[in-house]
Amino acid sequence: MPRQKMSEAEKTETRAVRDYLKVLEANQPRRGRKRTPASIRKQIDGTAVAMEGASATKRLALVQQRLDLETELDRLESAGSVDMGALETAFADNAASYGGRRGISYAAWREVGVPSPVLKAAGIRRST
């Protein structure tokens, strides 16, 4: 059975929900010491120092570590440029109809990290 095409409204709803959830996931608190751009730069500098006199295989591993650290640094620096307010507003405007059509409960939204005030703004209530 062929899948029905989504309407523009459904595409907008899906995009708003997906973008908000992606940002929530990327900004979830993690265990351990918080990573800062300065600490990552310090590690990048440390890999450059460690490369001096390293064997070919160790140098390869250090290059990969440096590339991973640079990616993490870019992600960390760009995280501050996300307009969370706009994403939250778009989510609140679309989440109720998106969740209603797909049968997503309040508990499911909460489990993936959506704060209760945002759900309240979206008109999603706990069922009794």
Image: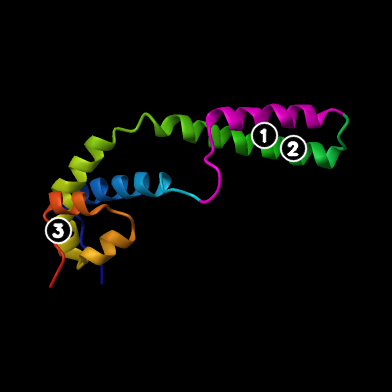
Is residue 28 something that shows in the picture? yes
Callout 3: SS: loop
Residue 46 at x, y percent in the picture: 72, 30
Disc nearer the start of the sequence (2/3): 2
Residue drawn at x 83%, y 42% is 57
Residue 120 at x, y percent in the picture: 14, 53
Mark 1 and mark 3: Cα distance apart in space: 44 Å
Mark 2 and mark 3: Cα distance apart in space: 48 Å
> Magenta segment: does it hold 49?
yes
Left or right of 62: which side holds 52? right
| Residue annotated with mark 3 | 124
Disc 1 + disc 3, Cβ < 8 Å: no
Mark 1 and mark 2: Cα distance apart in space: 6 Å
Q: Quadrant of residue 54?
A: top right
Callout 2: SS: helix
Q: Main secondary structure of the magenta part?
A: helix
| Residue annotated with mark 2 | 62
| Residue annotated with mark 1 | 66
> Magenta segment: does it hold 13?
no
Is residue 3 something that shows in the picture? no
Left or right of 10: which side holds 81? right
Callout 1: SS: helix
Q: Quadrant of residue 41?
A: top right
Between 98 and 87, which is closer to the camera in this rendering? 87
Query: Disc number at residue 92?
Result: none
Disc 1 + disc 2, Cβ < 8 Å: yes
Look at the image and give the residue range highlighted in magenta: 31-52
Q: Amino acid at mark 3?
A: Ile
What number of labels is visible? 3
Disc nearer the start of the sequence (1/3): 1
Residue 73 at x, y percent in the picture: 54, 32
